[in-house]
Amino acid sequence: WWYVTANLEDDAGNRYGVQWTLFRQALAPGAERAGWASQQVWMGHAAVTTSETHRFAETVGRGGIGQAGARAAPFEAWIDDWSFKSTDPDRELAAATLTASGADFGYALRLAAARPFVLQGDGGYSVKSDQGQASYYYSQPFFAARGAVTIDGREIAVTGRAWMDREWSSQPLAPEQRGWDWFSLHLPQGRKLMLFQLRSDADRPFFSGSWIDPDGRVTALAREDISLSPLGDVPVAGRRVPVRWRVIVK
């Protein structure tokens, strides 16, 4: 997947959250087949959040017919008219545009980063379980964002910060792993913190994380140095979803 989140403000200090995700999943192994024979399935999810409302949309597409896809150079990932696209031909994703829309919301953002990508885990190899499940994983946590969000037809100019994650794997999580809590935190003086826990039916959660200095240097965090504790939740679709957390890194 490609995953972008943004923390934004308008001129009056009102805050907005933006999320853009594109998932690709192969229904069968092997090189992608052409046209309607493609075994690639794509799903996009986009959202805008304020203190009062959460607007979102999802769309599903087939690979091989142009409805959804991704290319490396020049970089672009898209589904229907949603797009995450490089605008700097010399430095991939040093500058990009991000667009999506739903029935009652939309956004168009320009992203720019002066620092290189951050490799998560061991040089980009991110272990997800004690059984060895893993993914390749890198981030761009230093995007500056500028553009507009639209809610109920009203366009609002915004600026802020964005975080992009790119992750891929050839295998699912371990069979007993049932949930994934992931954090991307912008801290004072330009520091960043990435943490996640994978919850298990059979064992304690599997923790991983990275401390990212303002210059982009990465320190991998030991599992025993991470603690994530939910402090409050809300009901969503018949479940209790944590929305307040205590985060401790030793």
Image (cartoon, helix red, strand yellow):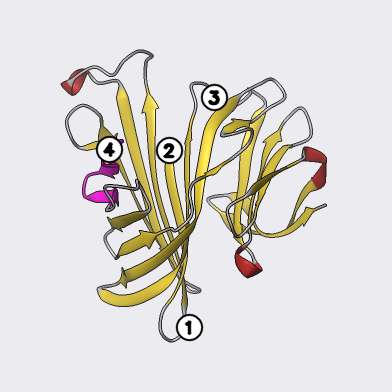
Image coordinates of residue 35 in percent, x first then y, are 16, 22
Question: Counting residues from the N terminus, which is met first, the one under dot 4 or under dot 2?
Answer: 2
Which tag is nearer the camera, tag 4 or tag 2?
4
Q: Is residue 191 magenta?
A: no
Q: Residues within 10 Å of mark 4 (few under 14, many from 20)?
A: few
Give the CA separation, mark 3 to mark 2.
Answer: 13 Å
Residue type highlighted by circle 1: Gly
**Amino acid type assigned to the residue bearing label 2 in the image:** Trp
Q: Nearer the viewer, residue 186 or 148?
A: 186
The amino acid on which the numbered mark 3 sits, given as a three-letter code, is Pro
List the single residue furthest toward the front.
90
Is 159 left or right of 32, judged from the image as shown? right
Q: Quadrant of the N terminus?
A: top left
| Residue stretch rendered in magenta on the structure | 71-86
Q: What is the secondary structure assignment of the residue under circle 4?
A: loop
Label 2 crowd bin: few (<14), some (14–19), many (20+), radius 10 Å = some
Query: In the rendered image, which residue does mark 3 sit on?
Result: 172
Q: Which residue, given by chain and number where applicable, does mark 2 sit on?
A: 1
Mark 3 residue element = loop
Residue behind mark 4? 73
Mark 4 or mark 3, which is nearer to you?
Answer: 4
Total count of labels: 4
In the rendered structure, are the residues bearing label 4 and label 3 in contact, judged by CB atoms less than 8 Å apart? no
| SS state under label 1 | loop
